Image: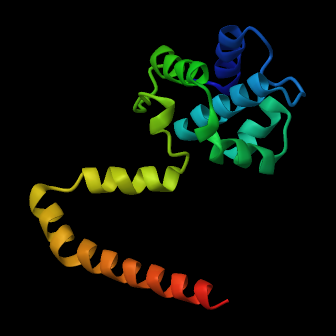
Amino acid sequence: MSLEELKFVLNQMYEFDISRKTRKREVVYAKKVFIQLAKRYGWQWKDIVPILGISHDNCIFHFNSFGCIRPMDLHHFNSCIDYFNIPLKKIPSVDSIDGNPRLEKVIDKVNSLSRKDLKYFDENVLNSFLKKLSFEKLVMESKSNLK
């Protein structure tokens, strides 16, 4: 899949030029879909920037704020996965979009663990982590109550 092909298909789906310079919601969300697909497919920021004509930091913002898209945008995202046969999981609903790719990677790693490894993780790592986290929250709350 080339970036030009992806842009062409999304232009057809949205029925407007997704690289148009505007702050209208539908165009901004279309850019989020384009950037999310391109980045997850493996394209680099330097390749994506000239296609949309936006800055590097703007691309990163759109990638990180993908979680705010509408159901129609998610439909176009999933349709592109099918059309280009991209090896990505489809996202079932906008409610299931976390918008945090790092968290998605962590979840994928945990999901790939064997039952034995999950049991070990639960007993030896997760419980102690949750206890520490609970303690830290308690300390932070007590600090904020003192102010």
The quarter of the image holding the C terminus is bottom right
The answer to whether any part of residue 43 appears in the image is no
The answer to whether any part of residue 28 appears in the image is yes
Identity of the residue furthest to the right in this view: 21
Q: Does 126 sit above or below residue 29?
A: below
* Coordinates of residue 82 in the picture (x, y in percent): 45, 17
Residue at (31, 80) in percent of width and height? 131
- Asked where in the image residue 118 lies, by quadrant, the reply is bottom left
* Coordinates of residue 83 in the picture (x, y in percent): 50, 14
* Coordinates of residue 101 in the picture (x, y in percent): 51, 50
Q: Does 23 sit above or below residue 111?
A: above
The quarter of the image holding the N terminus is top right
Residue at (61, 34) in percent of width and height? 38
How has the structure been colored for display?
A: rainbow
* Coordinates of residue 24 in the picture (x, y in percent): 83, 26
Residue at (72, 14) in percent of width and height? 11
- Asked where in the image residue 89 lies, by quadrant, the reply is top left
- Asked where in the image residue 4 lies, by quadrant, the reply is top right
